[in-house]
């Protein structure tokens, strides 16, 4: 793993930089509150701030649109909030430089099937393209092709399984199927110049990738992916150069106004990536450290703030590139999530009670189902039980708090 220089740039192949194309790619974008109002007025500068010129300097901009675009719809029953934005934001998002919108996430179908279909239409009507979502599984899992400076880029996008999934006959997000994606990558490698895999997965607020996630993303590179870029944890994780490919485990939020007055410090302190691509390889990357200020405007980090962020990110890169170290940090971080045990215990108590019509039973069984189908929960419960069944559990790393409180 190459260390991160102070300026956040890494060149992997200097010769391949000649004639390279550039892709700006972000984590989660939810245009809400002030950003929604401003984008509907066409005010891109007041939303994307000093990040805007970086976006517009690239040949392609990709963002994870983690909401549906509708003025109607009914919220679906799910864990977590239901998110939507006014479709009027689309012209400004296109103007800002985003041409491709990832829809494989756990909020894109929050207001039902019709709202999801409406979202896709708003994107295409504005001149954009979407990936990782569709009217059915066949469309949602299909590859999006995009020309980037003469390179044929194949984009594949999927999300951990959850309530916004599509089926073979209904619209929604492309559910993560690692063997199918690996096979898809292998096919695309034969007919494309660059294969980009975008995944939405990982435990929220945990800045370390689980063993399952590391194995999945590396398998995609082994199958032929040039880059794997991920998000969902709402916090930055590290990245690594692996077997000729590039993996970023979580970019964290891009622009997502916090839903509480005191969000975790890492909520507004994340990064985007500028990828310099050539045939079948990432020639170089540029890390774009950013934060959302009190006025809900993005700013590129500068000075000591930038240096501190890159120092932490360097540490996260070192952790995720060392499997033993990554497991140690992930297992320790998992111990904070005591509510899992509460819901499982409550569910078992209600099963013993025997009243299968009890609203509490139905609600807790819903939580149990969510834990079983969404793999980020398997990871966490596996880590917790691994630590707890040991007679002498390992002590958490001394600097765990430093990494858990990015920013």
Image (cartoon, helix red, strand yellow):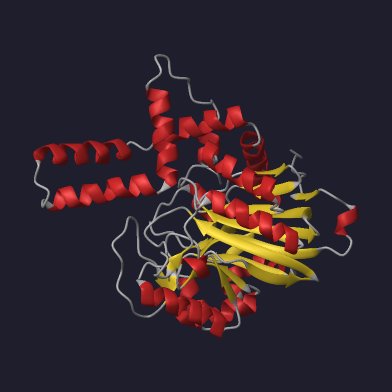
Residue lying farthest to the top in this orientation: 391
In percent of width and height, residue 108 lies at 44, 67
User: In the picture, residue 110 is in which quadrant?
Assistant: bottom left
| Residue found at x 39% / y 76% | 115
Q: Is residue 64 visible?
A: yes
The residue at the point 42 percent across, 33 percent down is 382
Indicate left or right for 124 with 2 as reference: left
| Most foreground residue, 98 or 178 | 178
Residue at 47%, 75% (x, y): give it.
Answer: 36
369 to 164, vertically: above or below: above
Left or right: where 295 falls relative to 186: left
Q: Position of residue 191 (x, y in %)?
A: 74, 63
Q: Nearer the viewer, residue 39 or 78?
A: 78
Image point 35% across, 71% down: which residue?
A: 111
Can residue 86 be seen from the camera position used here?
Answer: no
Q: Give the answer, above or below, for where 25 lies relative to 311.
A: below
Tell me: residue 172, above or below residue 233: below
The one of 9 and 345 positioned closer to us in this rendering: 345
Quarter of the figure that contains the N terminus:
top right
Task: Count up the numbered dots.
Answer: 0
In which image quadrant can residue 319 be found? top right
Q: Position of residue 362 (x, y in %)?
A: 18, 51
In the depicted structure, whether residue 51 falls above or below residue 248:
below
Quarter of the figure with residue 337: top left
How far across and down, in percent of the image, does residue 67 sit? 44, 68
């Amino acid at each position: 793993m190459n260390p991160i220089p102070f300026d956040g740039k890494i060149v992997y192949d200097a010769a391949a930089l000649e004639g390279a194309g550039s892709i700006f790619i972000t984590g989660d974008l939810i245009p809400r509150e002030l950003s929604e109002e401003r984008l509907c007025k066409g005010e891109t500068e007041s939303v994307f701030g000093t990040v805007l010129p970086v976006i517009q300097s690239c040949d392609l901009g990709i963002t994870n649109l983690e909401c549906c675009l509708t003025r109607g719809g009914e919220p679906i029953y799910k864990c977590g909030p239901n998110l939507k934005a006014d479709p009027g934001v689309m012209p400004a998002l296109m103007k800002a430089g985003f041409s491709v919108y990832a829809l494989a996430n756990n909020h894109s179908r929050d207001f039902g099937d019709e709202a999801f279909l409406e979202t896709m239409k708003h994107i295409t009507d504005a001149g954009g393209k979407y990936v990782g979502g569709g009217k059915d599984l066949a469309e949602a899992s299909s590859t999006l092709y995009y020309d980037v400076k003469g390179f044929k880029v194949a984009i594949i996008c999927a999300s951990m399984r959850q309530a916004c999934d599509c089926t073979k006959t209904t619209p929604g997000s492309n559910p993560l199927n690692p063997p199918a994606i690996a096979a898809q990558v292998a096919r695309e490698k034969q007919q494309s110049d660059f294969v980009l895999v975008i995944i939405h997965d990982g435990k929220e607020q945990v800045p370390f990738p689980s063993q399952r996630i590391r194995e999945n993303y590396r398998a995609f590179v082994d199958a032929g992916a040039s880059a794997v870029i991920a998000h969902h944890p709402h916090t930055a994780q590290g990245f690594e150069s692996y077997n000729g490919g590039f993996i970023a485990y979580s970019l964290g939020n891009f622009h997502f106004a916090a839903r509480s007055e005191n969000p975790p410090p890492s909520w507004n302190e994340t990064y985007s990536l500028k990828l310099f691509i050539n045939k079948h390889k990432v020639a170089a990357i540029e890390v774009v450290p950013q934060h959302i200020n009190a006025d809900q405007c993005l700013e590129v980090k500068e000075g000591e703030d930038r240096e501190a962020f890159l120092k932490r990110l360097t540490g996260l890169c070192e952790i995720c590139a060392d499997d033993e170290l990554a497991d140690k940090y992930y297992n320790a971080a998992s111990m904070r999530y005591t509510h899992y045990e509460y819901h499982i215990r409550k569910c078992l108590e209600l099963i013993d009670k025997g009243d299968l019509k009890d609203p509490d039973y139905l609600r807790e069984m819903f939580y149990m189902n969510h834990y079983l189908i969404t793999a980020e929960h398997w990871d966490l419960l596996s880590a917790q039980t691994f630590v707890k069944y040991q007679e002498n559990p390992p002590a958490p790393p001394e600097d765990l708090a430093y990494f858990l409180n990015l920013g």
